[in-house]
Image (spheres, grey):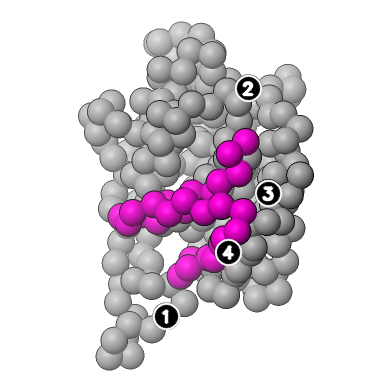
Amino acid sequence: MAIPCRAHDTAPGHAATGGVAARSCYDPAPTTADLEKRPLGFLRANQEATMATARTALMTAHDLYDLPDDAHRYELVRGELRRMPPIGGEHGRKTGDLTVPLWTHIRSRHLGGLFVGDPGFVFERDPDTVLAPDLAFVRAEILAGVVDPTRFLEVVPDLVVEIVSPSDWPAKVAAKVAAYHGFGVPLVWVLDPPPRTLTVHPRGAVPRVLGAGDILDGGNVLPGFRLPLGEPFAS
């Protein structure tokens, strides 16, 4: 069972024609059959990131949250535990470079919450899928409905940011973006440090590749946000 999709303004931060907010619901999360064809298959194929699990005993999001700390990072894909490789120094630094301007903008405008440090989001239930993006933004009105913010969040983020690591390959990154879009995330940013590019992936639209001379904007998801990319790409 997928987490129910939530109502969303057609263009967050903008009134619809006629003065009435046009409401729509994100497309429902894909079924297991859909995911076998495209999103999340990247985790099944990624043997380095796979931890052996008993096929007869699927884990839940609750089980994952209660795992003892063993210094490893994990995600959960349809009840199966996936160990994630540790991040390198460049990955961590670029995450910080984006965190500061995002946090400043979000906090100054009271837009919602910025989540850093691989926060867990429950995207699917029975079996459970918990993914942990590098950064995620959730609007204030959505956060207001969270019952227990101390555990994994059962909401769809408005923005997900992924920093590409040396262990990531293009097909894996593309599949993860497709997975986020399949679960209803409207905007995904993928920062690739070595070539110094940031790809903007709006849900249902053509991606845009930005470089060091470009300005990153938040579109309808983060109105007013603008960041010259020379800053996160500085050596």
Percent across and percent down for residue 108 are 71, 74
**Of tags 1 and 3, which is closer to the observer?**
3
Mark 3 in CB contact with mark 2 (< 8 angstroms): no
Residue 85: give its label. 2
Tags 1 and 4 in contact by the CB under 8 Å rule?
Answer: no
Q: Give the mark, 1 or 2, whose residue is nearer the N terminus.
A: 1
Q: Which mark is residue 14?
A: 1
| Residue 52 appearing in the image | yes
Q: CA distance from mark 1 to mark 4?
A: 22 Å
Report the mark closest to the observer, 3 or 2. 3
Q: Quadrant of residue 89?
A: top right
Write down the region rendered in magenta.
194-221
Which mark is in front, 2 or 4? 4
Dot 4 alpha-carbon crowd within 10 angstroms: few under 14, some 14 to 19, many 20 or more: few
Residue type at numbered disc 3: Phe
Closer to the N terminus: mark 2 or mark 4?
2
Q: Are marks 2 and 4 in contact (CB under 8 Å)?
A: no
Q: Count every numbered label the image shows and give the total.
A: 4
Residue at x 68%, y 49% (from the top left corner): 233
- The CA span between labels 3 and 4 is 12 Å
Q: Earlier in the sequence, mark 1 or mark 3?
A: 1
Determine the secondary structure under disc 1. Answer: loop
Which quadrant of the structure image shows residue 229? bottom right
Query: Is 62 displayed left or right of 180 in the figure?
Result: right
Residue 231 drawn at (x, y percent): 71, 56
Residue corresponding to mark 4: 215
Of circles 1 and 4, the one toward us is 4
Q: Which residue is mark 3?
A: 233
Residue 25 falls inside the magenta stretch: no
Quote the CA–CA distance across marks 1 and 2.
40 Å
Q: Residue at x 40, y 11 (%)?
A: 56
In-front residue for pair 137/164: 164
